[in-house]
Image (tube, rainbow, N blue to C red):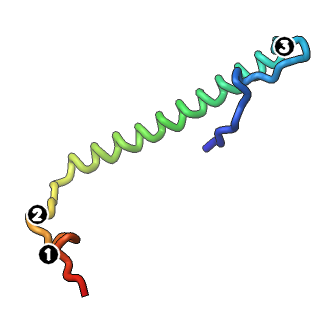
Amino acid sequence: MSKIRPQDRNGLRQTRSGKASDEEHADVCERLVAELQARRARLKELLSLVMTEAARTSASPVHRVAARTHSTRPPASMKKIA
């Protein structure tokens, strides 16, 4: 995964005149697009894995463990003080 880096207010470095150069702006945009494409690819892969797992588990018989209705431990507020 990529690391999030702290950026300036605009995410662009400014020149002495106070305006970001077109080249820097294009570079930032290209990096943003590349990052978004990489995230999209990772999310598609994850979705594919989830869908595969869902199909696998729905095709097999479900073995559920009965949920416990009562705890075997007393609540923390009911503990005895020594």
Q: Position of residue 74 (x, y in %)?
A: 15, 74
Q: Which residue matches tag 3? A: 18
Q: Of tags 1 and 2, which is closer to the observer?
A: 1
Q: Of tags 3 and 2, which is closer to the observer?
A: 3
Residue visible at 41% across and 38% down? Answer: 48
Query: Which image quadrant is residue 82 in?
Result: bottom left
Question: Which label is found at residue 29?
Answer: none
Name the secondary structure under disc 1.
loop
Quadrant of the snapshot with the N terminus: top right
* Sequence-earlier tag: 1 or 2: 2
Name the secondary structure under disc 2.
loop
Residue type at numbered disc 2: Ala
Query: Which image quadrant is residue 68 in?
Result: bottom left
Task: Give the farthest residue toward the right.
Answer: 16
Q: Position of residue 38 (x, y in %)?
A: 60, 33
Residue type at numbered disc 1: Thr
Residue visible at 16% across and 54% down? Answer: 61
Q: Which residue matches tag 2? A: 66
**Vertical position of residue 71 compared to residue 20: above or below:** below
* Sequence-earlier tag: 3 or 2: 3
Q: Which residue matches tag 1? A: 72
Residue visible at 81% across and 19% down? Answer: 24
Residue type at numbered disc 3: Gly
Q: CA distance from mark 3 to mark 2?
A: 66 Å
Q: Of tags 3 and 1, which is closer to the observer?
A: 3
* Sequence-earlier tag: 3 or 1: 3
Q: CA distance from mark 1 to mark 2?
A: 15 Å
Toward the viewer: 36 or 77?
A: 77
